[in-house]
Image (cartoon, helix red, strand yellow):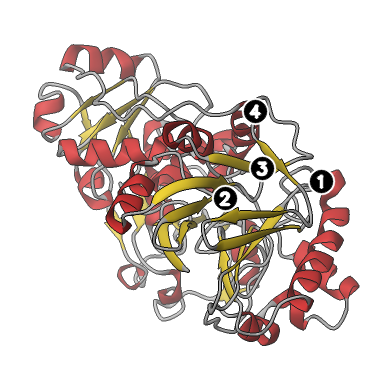
Amino acid sequence: MNVITIETASLGDRSYVVHDGEVALVVDPQRDIDRVLAAAHAARVTITHVAETHVHNDYVSGGLTLARVTGATYLHAAAEPLRFDYHAVSDGDAVTVGSMRVEVRHTPGHTPHHLSYVVTADGAAPAAFTGGSLLYGTVGRTDLIGPESTDELTHAQYRSVHALADSLPDQTLVYPTHGFGSFCASAASEEESDGTLGTERTANIALTAPDEDRFVARLIAGLDAFPKYYAQMGPLNTAGASAADLSAPAAVDPVELARRIHRGEWVVDLRNRRDFAASHLAGTIGIELATNFSTYLGWLLPWGMPITLLADSRDDIAEAQAQLVRIGIDRPAGAADGGIDRWSPDADRSAYAVTTFAEMTDLDSPTILDTRRNGEYAAGHVDGSTHIPLHELLGRLDEVPAGLVYVHCQSGYRASIAVSLLDRAGHDAVLIDDNFANARSGGFTLVD
Protein backbone atom coordinates (compact mmCIF):
# COMPACT_ATOMS: atom_id res chain seq x y z
CA MET A 1 0.00 0.00 0.00
CA ASN A 2 1.29 3.43 -0.99
CA VAL A 3 -0.06 6.83 0.03
CA ILE A 4 0.53 9.97 -2.02
CA THR A 5 -0.23 13.19 -0.14
CA ILE A 6 -1.51 16.20 -2.07
CA GLU A 7 -1.28 19.27 0.12
CA THR A 8 -3.37 22.41 -0.26
CA ALA A 9 -1.45 24.79 1.96
CA SER A 10 -3.75 27.72 1.16
CA LEU A 11 -6.57 25.96 3.04
CA GLY A 12 -4.59 23.82 5.48
CA ASP A 13 -5.93 20.59 3.96
CA ARG A 14 -4.59 17.38 2.47
CA SER A 15 -5.99 14.94 -0.08
CA TYR A 16 -4.68 11.40 -0.54
CA VAL A 17 -4.14 8.92 -3.34
CA VAL A 18 -3.93 5.42 -1.84
CA HIS A 19 -2.83 2.69 -4.24
CA ASP A 20 -1.44 -0.83 -4.49
CA GLY A 21 0.62 -0.22 -7.62
CA GLU A 22 -2.29 -0.85 -9.96
CA VAL A 23 -5.49 0.79 -8.70
CA ALA A 24 -6.15 3.72 -6.40
CA LEU A 25 -8.58 5.19 -3.90
CA VAL A 26 -8.65 9.00 -3.63
CA VAL A 27 -9.73 10.52 -0.32
CA ASP A 28 -11.17 14.05 -0.05
CA PRO A 29 -9.95 15.53 -3.35
CA GLN A 30 -9.87 19.27 -3.84
CA ARG A 31 -11.80 20.83 -6.71
CA ASP A 32 -8.78 21.29 -8.96
CA ILE A 33 -8.49 17.59 -9.75
CA ASP A 34 -5.62 18.02 -12.20
CA ARG A 35 -3.19 17.51 -9.32
CA VAL A 36 -4.83 14.20 -8.43
CA LEU A 37 -4.86 13.01 -12.03
CA ALA A 38 -1.20 13.95 -12.43
CA ALA A 39 -0.26 12.04 -9.27
CA ALA A 40 -2.14 8.93 -10.42
CA HIS A 41 -0.57 9.16 -13.87
CA ALA A 42 2.94 9.49 -12.39
CA ALA A 43 2.31 6.43 -10.20
CA ARG A 44 0.88 4.55 -13.20
CA VAL A 45 -2.29 3.61 -11.36
CA THR A 46 -5.98 3.75 -12.26
CA ILE A 47 -8.36 5.59 -9.96
CA THR A 48 -11.26 3.21 -9.29
CA HIS A 49 -12.70 4.74 -6.09
CA VAL A 50 -13.15 8.22 -4.64
CA ALA A 51 -14.15 8.65 -0.98
CA GLU A 52 -15.40 11.64 0.98
CA THR A 53 -15.07 11.70 4.73
CA HIS A 54 -17.79 14.35 5.04
CA VAL A 55 -19.58 17.22 3.36
CA HIS A 56 -16.80 19.78 3.53
CA ASN A 57 -17.31 23.23 5.01
CA ASP A 58 -14.01 24.82 4.05
CA TYR A 59 -13.69 23.99 0.36
CA VAL A 60 -15.58 22.82 -2.70
CA SER A 61 -15.00 19.13 -3.23
CA GLY A 62 -13.65 17.77 -6.48
CA GLY A 63 -14.94 14.29 -5.65
CA LEU A 64 -17.97 14.24 -7.91
CA THR A 65 -16.08 15.63 -10.89
CA LEU A 66 -13.17 13.24 -10.33
CA ALA A 67 -15.52 10.26 -10.13
CA ARG A 68 -17.27 11.29 -13.34
CA VAL A 69 -14.03 11.96 -15.22
CA THR A 70 -12.45 8.64 -14.21
CA GLY A 71 -15.57 6.49 -13.97
CA ALA A 72 -14.65 5.73 -10.35
CA THR A 73 -17.09 4.62 -7.67
CA TYR A 74 -17.90 7.58 -5.45
CA LEU A 75 -18.20 6.71 -1.73
CA HIS A 76 -20.17 8.97 0.58
CA ALA A 77 -22.11 8.53 3.81
CA ALA A 78 -25.48 6.90 3.22
CA ALA A 79 -27.10 9.30 5.69
CA GLU A 80 -26.03 12.44 3.80
CA PRO A 81 -28.94 14.14 1.94
CA LEU A 82 -26.99 14.66 -1.29
CA ARG A 83 -28.60 15.74 -4.53
CA PHE A 84 -26.71 13.40 -6.85
CA ASP A 85 -26.12 9.69 -7.20
CA TYR A 86 -23.26 8.06 -5.30
CA HIS A 87 -22.29 4.77 -3.70
CA ALA A 88 -23.73 4.97 -0.19
CA VAL A 89 -21.65 3.48 2.63
CA SER A 90 -22.25 3.14 6.36
CA ASP A 91 -20.43 2.11 9.51
CA GLY A 92 -18.97 -1.37 9.19
CA ASP A 93 -19.14 -1.58 5.40
CA ALA A 94 -16.05 -2.82 3.56
CA VAL A 95 -14.99 -2.03 0.00
CA THR A 96 -12.30 -3.82 -1.98
CA VAL A 97 -9.91 -1.65 -3.97
CA GLY A 98 -7.45 -3.94 -5.75
CA SER A 99 -5.53 -5.74 -3.04
CA MET A 100 -6.63 -3.24 -0.38
CA ARG A 101 -9.57 -3.49 2.00
CA VAL A 102 -11.33 -0.23 2.89
CA GLU A 103 -13.38 -0.39 6.08
CA VAL A 104 -15.90 2.38 6.76
CA ARG A 105 -16.19 3.85 10.27
CA HIS A 106 -18.86 6.31 11.37
CA THR A 107 -16.99 9.00 13.32
CA PRO A 108 -19.46 11.82 14.06
CA GLY A 109 -18.25 15.02 15.65
CA HIS A 110 -16.89 17.36 13.01
CA THR A 111 -20.18 16.71 11.19
CA PRO A 112 -23.03 14.39 12.16
CA HIS A 113 -22.47 11.86 9.35
CA HIS A 114 -18.67 12.01 9.24
CA LEU A 115 -16.85 8.87 8.10
CA SER A 116 -13.29 7.64 8.51
CA TYR A 117 -11.75 4.98 6.27
CA VAL A 118 -9.36 2.34 7.56
CA VAL A 119 -7.32 0.82 4.72
CA THR A 120 -5.43 -2.44 5.15
CA ALA A 121 -3.30 -4.52 2.84
CA ASP A 122 -1.16 -7.60 3.37
CA GLY A 123 2.09 -6.77 5.12
CA ALA A 124 1.36 -3.07 5.63
CA ALA A 125 0.41 -1.14 8.74
CA PRO A 126 -3.22 0.01 8.74
CA ALA A 127 -3.85 3.50 7.40
CA ALA A 128 -6.68 5.56 8.89
CA PHE A 129 -8.02 8.41 6.76
CA THR A 130 -9.71 10.48 9.41
CA GLY A 131 -10.91 13.63 7.62
CA GLY A 132 -12.01 16.09 10.30
CA SER A 133 -12.18 13.59 13.16
CA LEU A 134 -8.79 12.57 14.60
CA LEU A 135 -6.23 15.19 13.56
CA TYR A 136 -2.57 15.50 14.51
CA GLY A 137 -2.64 16.44 18.17
CA THR A 138 -6.23 17.61 18.06
CA VAL A 139 -9.63 17.06 16.45
CA GLY A 140 -11.84 18.83 13.94
CA ARG A 141 -13.94 21.69 15.28
CA THR A 142 -17.53 20.89 16.16
CA ASP A 143 -19.38 24.18 15.71
CA LEU A 144 -19.69 24.38 11.93
CA ILE A 145 -23.19 22.92 11.71
CA GLY A 146 -24.60 25.48 14.14
CA PRO A 147 -24.37 26.54 17.79
CA GLU A 148 -27.35 24.39 18.74
CA SER A 149 -25.39 21.26 17.75
CA THR A 150 -21.97 22.13 19.15
CA ASP A 151 -22.25 20.49 22.55
CA GLU A 152 -23.74 17.27 21.17
CA LEU A 153 -21.15 17.04 18.38
CA THR A 154 -18.27 17.75 20.77
CA HIS A 155 -19.30 14.83 22.95
CA ALA A 156 -19.63 12.73 19.77
CA GLN A 157 -16.16 13.80 18.64
CA TYR A 158 -14.61 12.57 21.86
CA ARG A 159 -16.36 9.20 21.61
CA SER A 160 -15.53 8.79 17.92
CA VAL A 161 -11.82 9.38 18.44
CA HIS A 162 -11.71 6.97 21.36
CA ALA A 163 -13.66 4.29 19.52
CA LEU A 164 -11.36 4.54 16.51
CA ALA A 165 -8.18 4.53 18.62
CA ASP A 166 -9.38 1.62 20.76
CA SER A 167 -9.88 -0.55 17.67
CA LEU A 168 -6.52 0.03 15.98
CA PRO A 169 -2.87 -0.79 16.80
CA ASP A 170 -0.21 1.78 17.66
CA GLN A 171 1.51 1.40 14.28
CA THR A 172 -1.58 2.66 12.45
CA LEU A 173 -0.71 5.59 10.21
CA VAL A 174 -3.08 8.52 10.62
CA TYR A 175 -3.92 10.66 7.57
CA PRO A 176 -6.26 13.56 8.44
CA THR A 177 -7.70 15.94 5.87
CA HIS A 178 -7.70 19.01 8.12
CA GLY A 179 -5.30 20.36 10.69
CA PHE A 180 -2.43 21.94 8.75
CA GLY A 181 -3.49 25.54 9.32
CA SER A 182 -7.14 24.87 8.51
CA PHE A 183 -9.81 26.74 10.45
CA CYS A 184 -11.60 23.37 10.62
CA ALA A 185 -9.15 22.36 13.36
CA SER A 186 -9.79 23.13 17.02
CA ALA A 187 -7.71 23.60 20.18
CA ALA A 188 -4.14 22.53 19.52
CA SER A 189 -1.86 20.22 21.46
CA GLU A 190 1.61 21.35 22.52
CA GLU A 191 3.00 17.93 21.60
CA GLU A 192 4.39 16.94 18.21
CA SER A 193 2.97 14.04 16.23
CA ASP A 194 4.85 11.64 13.97
CA GLY A 195 1.64 10.59 12.27
CA THR A 196 1.18 7.29 14.10
CA LEU A 197 -1.68 6.37 16.36
CA GLY A 198 0.81 5.38 19.06
CA THR A 199 2.05 8.96 19.27
CA GLU A 200 -1.47 10.33 19.13
CA ARG A 201 -2.30 8.38 22.27
CA THR A 202 0.17 10.60 24.16
CA ALA A 203 -0.25 13.83 22.18
CA ASN A 204 -3.88 14.20 21.10
CA ILE A 205 -6.10 16.42 23.23
CA ALA A 206 -8.99 13.95 22.94
CA LEU A 207 -6.92 10.92 23.92
CA THR A 208 -5.11 12.61 26.81
CA ALA A 209 -8.04 14.48 28.35
CA PRO A 210 -8.84 13.34 31.91
CA ASP A 211 -12.45 12.68 30.93
CA GLU A 212 -15.10 13.48 28.35
CA ASP A 213 -16.59 16.51 30.12
CA ARG A 214 -13.25 18.24 30.57
CA PHE A 215 -12.38 17.57 26.93
CA VAL A 216 -15.70 19.09 25.84
CA ALA A 217 -15.16 22.15 28.02
CA ARG A 218 -11.64 22.70 26.68
CA LEU A 219 -12.56 22.27 23.04
CA ILE A 220 -15.60 24.56 23.18
CA ALA A 221 -13.66 27.22 25.11
CA GLY A 222 -11.00 27.22 22.35
CA LEU A 223 -13.36 27.70 19.43
CA ASP A 224 -12.89 31.03 17.68
CA ALA A 225 -14.24 32.63 14.52
CA PHE A 226 -14.10 30.78 11.21
CA PRO A 227 -14.31 32.16 7.65
CA LYS A 228 -17.67 33.52 6.54
CA TYR A 229 -17.50 31.72 3.21
CA TYR A 230 -17.86 28.37 5.01
CA ALA A 231 -21.61 28.98 4.96
CA GLN A 232 -21.55 28.59 1.17
CA MET A 233 -19.51 25.38 0.99
CA GLY A 234 -21.99 22.90 2.49
CA PRO A 235 -24.79 23.74 0.04
CA LEU A 236 -22.38 23.63 -2.92
CA ASN A 237 -21.05 20.23 -1.91
CA THR A 238 -24.49 18.84 -1.13
CA ALA A 239 -25.67 19.86 -4.59
CA GLY A 240 -22.52 18.54 -6.29
CA ALA A 241 -19.97 21.00 -7.62
CA SER A 242 -19.26 21.42 -11.31
CA ALA A 243 -15.79 21.15 -12.80
CA ALA A 244 -13.47 24.08 -12.15
CA ASP A 245 -12.96 26.58 -14.97
CA LEU A 246 -9.41 27.88 -14.80
CA SER A 247 -9.30 29.57 -18.20
CA ALA A 248 -7.85 33.08 -18.22
CA PRO A 249 -10.31 35.80 -17.16
CA ALA A 250 -11.19 38.63 -19.52
CA ALA A 251 -8.67 41.45 -19.73
CA VAL A 252 -9.85 44.74 -18.25
CA ASP A 253 -8.70 48.03 -19.82
CA PRO A 254 -8.02 51.20 -17.80
CA VAL A 255 -11.39 52.79 -18.60
CA GLU A 256 -13.38 49.75 -17.48
CA LEU A 257 -11.16 49.35 -14.45
CA ALA A 258 -11.93 52.92 -13.39
CA ARG A 259 -15.65 52.23 -13.79
CA ARG A 260 -15.46 49.15 -11.57
CA ILE A 261 -13.58 51.00 -8.86
CA HIS A 262 -16.11 53.86 -9.04
CA ARG A 263 -19.01 51.39 -8.70
CA GLY A 264 -17.49 50.05 -5.50
CA GLU A 265 -16.71 46.60 -6.88
CA TRP A 266 -13.87 44.62 -5.35
CA VAL A 267 -10.75 45.31 -7.36
CA VAL A 268 -8.07 43.27 -5.60
CA ASP A 269 -4.35 44.02 -5.92
CA LEU A 270 -2.26 40.86 -5.42
CA ARG A 271 1.14 42.51 -5.07
CA ASN A 272 3.43 42.42 -2.05
CA ARG A 273 1.90 44.41 0.82
CA ARG A 274 4.75 46.91 0.96
CA ASP A 275 4.52 47.57 -2.77
CA PHE A 276 0.78 48.17 -2.37
CA ALA A 277 1.40 50.55 0.54
CA ALA A 278 3.93 52.54 -1.50
CA SER A 279 1.51 53.10 -4.38
CA HIS A 280 -1.81 51.65 -5.47
CA LEU A 281 -4.87 52.64 -7.46
CA ALA A 282 -7.19 54.56 -5.15
CA GLY A 283 -10.20 52.44 -4.23
CA THR A 284 -8.52 49.07 -4.68
CA ILE A 285 -8.02 46.48 -1.95
CA GLY A 286 -4.63 44.96 -1.19
CA ILE A 287 -4.61 41.23 -0.44
CA GLU A 288 -1.13 39.89 -1.03
CA LEU A 289 -1.01 36.64 -3.00
CA ALA A 290 0.25 34.30 -0.30
CA THR A 291 -0.61 30.97 1.26
CA ASN A 292 -3.75 32.27 2.94
CA PHE A 293 -4.93 34.64 0.20
CA SER A 294 -8.18 32.85 -0.61
CA THR A 295 -9.09 32.34 3.05
CA TYR A 296 -9.11 36.04 3.84
CA LEU A 297 -10.59 37.16 0.54
CA GLY A 298 -13.39 34.62 0.95
CA TRP A 299 -13.86 35.65 4.58
CA LEU A 300 -14.26 39.36 3.77
CA LEU A 301 -15.92 39.40 0.36
CA PRO A 302 -19.68 40.04 0.21
CA TRP A 303 -20.72 36.75 -1.41
CA GLY A 304 -21.53 37.28 -5.09
CA MET A 305 -19.60 40.56 -5.36
CA PRO A 306 -17.72 40.76 -8.71
CA ILE A 307 -13.95 40.53 -8.32
CA THR A 308 -11.32 42.00 -10.60
CA LEU A 309 -7.75 40.86 -10.02
CA LEU A 310 -4.64 43.01 -10.49
CA ALA A 311 -1.14 41.55 -10.57
CA ASP A 312 2.35 41.98 -11.94
CA SER A 313 2.18 38.73 -13.91
CA ARG A 314 -0.29 36.34 -15.52
CA ASP A 315 1.11 33.56 -13.37
CA ASP A 316 -0.05 35.43 -10.28
CA ILE A 317 -3.53 35.78 -11.75
CA ALA A 318 -3.59 32.04 -12.48
CA GLU A 319 -2.47 31.14 -8.95
CA ALA A 320 -5.14 33.41 -7.45
CA GLN A 321 -7.77 31.74 -9.63
CA ALA A 322 -6.64 28.28 -8.54
CA GLN A 323 -7.02 29.29 -4.90
CA LEU A 324 -10.40 30.93 -5.45
CA VAL A 325 -12.12 28.07 -7.28
CA ARG A 326 -11.40 25.86 -4.28
CA ILE A 327 -13.75 28.02 -2.22
CA GLY A 328 -16.43 28.43 -4.86
CA ILE A 329 -15.41 31.76 -6.37
CA ASP A 330 -15.44 30.48 -9.90
CA ARG A 331 -14.78 33.28 -12.35
CA PRO A 332 -13.18 36.66 -11.71
CA ALA A 333 -15.05 39.43 -13.48
CA GLY A 334 -11.75 40.29 -15.14
CA ALA A 335 -8.05 40.85 -14.60
CA ALA A 336 -5.14 43.08 -15.51
CA ASP A 337 -1.46 42.21 -15.32
CA GLY A 338 1.79 43.96 -16.12
CA GLY A 339 2.04 46.20 -13.07
CA ILE A 340 0.43 49.38 -11.81
CA ASP A 341 1.67 51.63 -14.59
CA ARG A 342 0.03 49.40 -17.18
CA TRP A 343 -3.27 48.85 -15.34
CA SER A 344 -4.31 52.47 -15.34
CA PRO A 345 -1.48 54.95 -15.86
CA ASP A 346 -3.63 58.06 -15.35
CA ALA A 347 -5.74 56.88 -12.40
CA ASP A 348 -5.57 58.45 -8.96
CA ARG A 349 -3.00 56.82 -6.71
CA SER A 350 -2.99 56.34 -2.97
CA ALA A 351 -0.34 55.33 -0.45
CA TYR A 352 0.21 54.91 3.26
CA ALA A 353 3.16 54.51 5.61
CA VAL A 354 4.63 51.24 6.89
CA THR A 355 6.45 50.85 10.17
CA THR A 356 7.58 48.31 12.79
CA PHE A 357 7.13 48.18 16.57
CA ALA A 358 10.77 49.15 17.08
CA GLU A 359 10.34 52.22 14.88
CA MET A 360 7.42 53.40 17.03
CA THR A 361 9.33 53.71 20.32
CA ASP A 362 9.55 57.51 20.14
CA LEU A 363 5.88 58.07 19.34
CA ASP A 364 3.76 59.74 22.00
CA SER A 365 0.75 57.49 22.79
CA PRO A 366 -0.01 56.25 19.25
CA THR A 367 -3.53 54.99 18.57
CA ILE A 368 -3.24 51.26 17.92
CA LEU A 369 -5.78 48.98 16.24
CA ASP A 370 -5.40 45.23 16.83
CA THR A 371 -6.99 43.17 14.03
CA ARG A 372 -6.33 39.68 15.40
CA ARG A 373 -9.03 37.19 16.37
CA ASN A 374 -10.57 37.18 19.84
CA GLY A 375 -8.45 34.32 21.16
CA GLU A 376 -5.23 35.97 20.07
CA TYR A 377 -6.24 39.27 21.65
CA ALA A 378 -7.22 37.58 24.92
CA ALA A 379 -3.83 35.85 25.11
CA GLY A 380 -2.04 39.22 25.16
CA HIS A 381 -2.42 42.67 23.60
CA VAL A 382 -0.99 46.17 23.70
CA ASP A 383 -2.34 48.08 26.66
CA GLY A 384 -4.92 50.62 25.50
CA SER A 385 -5.27 49.24 21.97
CA THR A 386 -8.60 49.07 20.17
CA HIS A 387 -9.60 45.58 19.10
CA ILE A 388 -11.57 44.95 15.91
CA PRO A 389 -10.86 41.54 14.29
CA LEU A 390 -10.17 41.81 10.58
CA HIS A 391 -13.23 39.72 9.69
CA GLU A 392 -15.46 42.23 11.55
CA LEU A 393 -13.81 45.40 10.27
CA LEU A 394 -16.12 46.19 7.36
CA GLY A 395 -19.13 46.08 9.65
CA ARG A 396 -17.47 48.16 12.36
CA LEU A 397 -15.74 50.95 10.45
CA ASP A 398 -17.58 53.49 12.57
CA GLU A 399 -15.72 52.13 15.64
CA VAL A 400 -12.27 52.85 14.21
CA PRO A 401 -10.69 55.67 16.25
CA ALA A 402 -10.49 59.06 14.60
CA GLY A 403 -7.15 60.41 13.42
CA LEU A 404 -4.01 58.47 12.59
CA VAL A 405 -4.31 54.77 13.48
CA TYR A 406 -1.47 52.24 13.64
CA VAL A 407 -2.71 48.78 12.63
CA HIS A 408 -1.19 45.42 13.55
CA CYS A 409 -1.99 41.69 13.58
CA GLN A 410 0.25 38.73 14.39
CA SER A 411 2.61 38.99 11.42
CA GLY A 412 1.56 41.95 9.27
CA TYR A 413 -0.49 40.07 6.67
CA ARG A 414 -3.98 40.62 8.08
CA ALA A 415 -3.07 44.14 9.15
CA SER A 416 -2.08 44.94 5.56
CA ILE A 417 -5.55 43.92 4.37
CA ALA A 418 -7.14 45.96 7.14
CA VAL A 419 -5.15 49.09 6.28
CA SER A 420 -6.07 48.76 2.61
CA LEU A 421 -9.76 48.60 3.60
CA LEU A 422 -9.33 51.60 5.91
CA ASP A 423 -7.52 53.53 3.19
CA ARG A 424 -10.35 52.71 0.77
CA ALA A 425 -12.88 54.00 3.32
CA GLY A 426 -11.00 57.27 3.85
CA HIS A 427 -9.27 56.55 7.18
CA ASP A 428 -5.71 57.64 7.90
CA ALA A 429 -3.81 54.47 8.84
CA VAL A 430 -0.26 53.11 9.11
CA LEU A 431 0.64 49.47 8.62
CA ILE A 432 2.70 47.86 11.38
CA ASP A 433 4.38 45.22 9.25
CA ASP A 434 5.94 43.26 12.08
CA ASN A 435 5.60 40.18 14.23
CA PHE A 436 3.52 40.86 17.34
CA ALA A 437 6.21 39.14 19.42
CA ASN A 438 8.31 42.29 18.87
CA ALA A 439 5.77 44.60 20.53
CA ARG A 440 7.16 44.21 24.06
CA SER A 441 10.78 44.71 22.96
CA GLY A 442 9.58 47.78 21.10
CA GLY A 443 8.59 49.33 24.40
CA PHE A 444 4.88 48.53 24.51
CA THR A 445 3.16 47.21 27.60
CA LEU A 446 1.23 43.99 27.02
CA VAL A 447 -1.78 42.89 29.06
CA ASP A 448 -4.19 39.96 28.94
Can you tell which of label 4 and label 1 is closer to the viewer? 4
Within 10 Å of disc 1 (Cα), the crowding (few <14, some 14-19, many 20+) is: few
Marks 2 and 4, the one that precedes in the sequence: 4
Q: Residue 201 sits in which quadrant? A: bottom right
What whole-number distance in Å separates the C-alpha atoms at marks 4 and 1? 30 Å
SS label for mark 2: loop
Tell me the number on the disc at residue 76. Answer: 3
What whole-number distance in Å separates the C-alpha atoms at marks 1 and 2? 20 Å
* Quarter occupied by the C terminus: bottom right
The answer to the question of whether label 4 and label 1 lie on touching residues, with beta carbons closer than 8 A, is no
Marks 3 and 2, the one that precedes in the sequence: 3
Q: Residue 199 sits in which quadrant? A: bottom right
Using the rendered image of the protein, determine whether residue 49 is visible from the camera's viewpoint.
Answer: yes
Which residue is at a point 64% across and 80% down the rendered structure image?
197
The answer to the question of whether label 3 and label 2 lie on touching residues, with beta carbons closer than 8 A, is no
Within 10 Å of disc 4 (Cα), the crowding (few <14, some 14-19, many 20+) is: few
**Residue 306 left/right relative to 248:** right
- Residue 443 picture location, percent across and down: 43, 78
Can you tell which of label 1 and label 2 is closer to the viewer? 1
Q: Which residue is mark 4?
A: 85
The kind of residue on which mark 1 rests is: Pro
Q: Which residue is mark 2?
A: 389
- Residue 113 picture location, percent across and down: 77, 47
Can you tell which of label 2 and label 4 is closer to the viewer? 4
The answer to the question of whether label 1 and label 3 lie on touching residues, with beta carbons closer than 8 A, is no
What whole-number distance in Å separates the C-alpha atoms at marks 2 and 4? 41 Å
Which residue is at a point 55% across and 81% down the rendered structure image?
193
The kind of residue on which mark 3 rests is: His
Can you tell which of label 3 and label 2 is closer to the viewer? 3
Q: Which residue is mark 1?
A: 147
